[in-house]
């Protein structure tokens, strides 16, 4: 009897392996009709274009395309279609109160709570039209890696994420006003503080082992700077493993060591001098100006509950258009990044978009602004030709905004009609 069962089992296996192999069902096709399409490589808007999508890739782009059978038509002939937006400077594991110190979030909230909260923040970025974000620290000990992996494994919904893990900095970090007895403990909950070349190299290697996509350093923390030798060691160690380094720096005098050390990018860059920007352009170092905007200032003051006039807020932003025009003229590659981390009582993705609309309101052309959040960002993230563009063989990361963005940029950018990431429709609104 046992022999008969074994023979039957073997016969069944033989039958299974000799059956004809049927191919999987064909990947879904979409044809997206665009009234206006933003070409991020040429930085122009094109009229009446079509995008043919198969699976997670863009097959063709043009005015009139041949459509395969059973293709689903997405008609946005009255809307503006762009590559999925990129925010190159996010902090989705942090929600700082408007009047709180940065350390409060880490001290008062568990890692579990911060990760669960980040689930909502991540989804809000998709809802706003961002299909890729780069999260740059203030995320505990590699909590950003966990959220990124959860999105990649489809446990949660969110944009494509690139992450830095804890920020590597000098011994004072970024957390201020901590009691002396708690300083080291709390700081190490959030950051990697190093002293000396060997500690700097070791920190980079630990980050890479933990699975980060980019290294972020503090060119200057609260008061202390990383030394030139420490920064050189960090950059060299990271580059040996084909990992980029970007530097937090909000002061011109402090950025020159980072430039000499060979960083790939600089974050913030408030009031950099023309000569500094020109040097960065010459060396191919990109800049992420995480500048404020009138909308952001209004929302921040609303949360604070203080009294203000729009003119008073405008007065506090007078340097922004000057700085942005300097960046544009310098030729340095400008990349959009919001640095959104305050609890602003509105969806994080919408709050992050204020930076982009601010660039426009401060005088930069719509085409230039969109390029900072698409093709430029893709290049900075080492994903050129994959994201940030709508062309053959790029990922089907696409955002659709209501109306004509060339005429009403801000209104259109906040009117999200459809968001597709990797060929999957993630958001659709009437």
Image: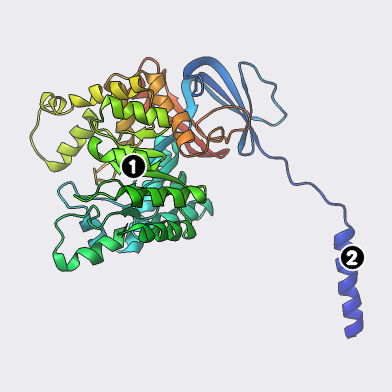
Query: Which quadrant is home to the C terminus?
Result: top left
Q: Which residue is mark 1?
A: 258
Q: Are marks 2 and 1 in contact (CB under 8 Å)?
A: no
Q: Is residue 79 left or right of residue 269?
A: right
CA gap, disc 2 and disc 1: 65 Å
Q: For residue 213, say whether it is visible.
A: no
Q: Position of residue 59 (x, y in %)?
A: 65, 29
Q: State whether residue 72 is above or below residue 45.
A: below
Between 394 and 5, the one lying in front of the other is: 394
Q: Residue furthest bottom?
A: 1
Quarter of the rendering containing residue 257: top left
Residue 395's spot in the image, x, y percent? Answer: 57, 36
Q: Which mark is residue 14?
A: 2
Look at the numbered disc 2 and give the secondary structure of its residue: helix
Q: Residues within 10 Å of mark 2 (few under 14, many from 20)?
A: few
Q: Position of residue 215 (x, y in %)?
A: 41, 49
Q: Residue furthest left?
A: 307
Instruction: Pick whichever of labels 2 and 1 is earlier in the sequence.
Output: 2
Give the label on residue 86, or none: none
Residue at x-position 18% and y-position 46%: 98
Q: Position of residue 280 (x, y in %)?
A: 37, 31
Q: Quadrant of the N terminus?
A: bottom right
């Amino acid at each position: 009897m046992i022999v008969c069962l074994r023979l039957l089992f073997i016969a069944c296996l033989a039958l299974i392996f000799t059956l004809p192999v049927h191919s999987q069902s064909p990947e879904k096709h979409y044809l997206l009709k665009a009234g206006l399409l933003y070409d991020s490589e040429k930085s122009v808007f094109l009229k009446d274009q079509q995008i043919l999508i198969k699976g997670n890739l863009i097959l063709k782009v043009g005015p009139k395309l041949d459509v395969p059978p059973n293709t689903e038509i997405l008609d946005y002939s009255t809307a503006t279609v762009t590559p999925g937006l990129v925010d190159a400077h996010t902090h989705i594991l942090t929600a700082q109160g408007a009047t709180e110190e940065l350390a409060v979030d880490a001290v008062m909230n568990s890692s579990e709570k911060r990760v669960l909260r980040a689930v909502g923040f991540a989804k809000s970025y998709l809802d706003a039209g961002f299909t890729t974000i780069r999260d740059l620290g203030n995320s505990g000990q590699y909590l950003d890696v966990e959220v990124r992996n959860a999105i990649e494994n489809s446990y949660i919904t969110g944009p494509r994420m690139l992450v830095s893990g804890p920020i590597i900095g000098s011994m004072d970090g970024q957390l201020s006003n901590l009691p002396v007895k708690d300083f080291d403990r709390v700081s190490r909950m959030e950051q990697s503080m190093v002293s000396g070349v060997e500690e700097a190299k070791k920190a980079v290697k630990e980050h890479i082992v933990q699975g980060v996509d980019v290294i972020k350093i503090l060119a200057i923390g609260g008061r202390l700077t990383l030394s030139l030798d420490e920064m050189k060691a960090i950059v060299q160690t990271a580059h040996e493993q084909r990992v980029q380094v970007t530097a937090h720096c909000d002061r011109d005098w402090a950025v020159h060591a980072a430039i000499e050390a060979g960083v790939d990018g600089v974050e913030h860059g408030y009031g950099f001098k023309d000569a500094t920007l020109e040097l960065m352009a010459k060396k191919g170092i990109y800049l992420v100006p995480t500048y404020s905007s009138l909308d952001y200032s209004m929302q921040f003051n609303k949360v604070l509950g203080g009294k203000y006039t729009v003119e008073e807020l405008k007065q506090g932003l007078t340097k922004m258009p000057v700085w942005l025009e300097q960046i544009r003229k310098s030729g340095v590659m400008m990349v959009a990044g919001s640095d959104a981390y305050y609890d602003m009582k509105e969806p994080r993705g919408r709050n992050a978009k204020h930076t982009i609309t601010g660039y426009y309101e401060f005088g930069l052309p719509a085409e230039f602004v969109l390029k900072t959040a698409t093709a430029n960002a893709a290049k900075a993230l080492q994903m050129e030709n994959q994201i940030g563009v709508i062309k053959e063989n790029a990922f089907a990361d696409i955002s659709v905004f209501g109306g004509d963005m060339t005429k009403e940029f801000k209104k259109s950018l906040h009117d999200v009609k459809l968001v597709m990431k990797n060929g999957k429709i993630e958001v659709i609104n009437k």
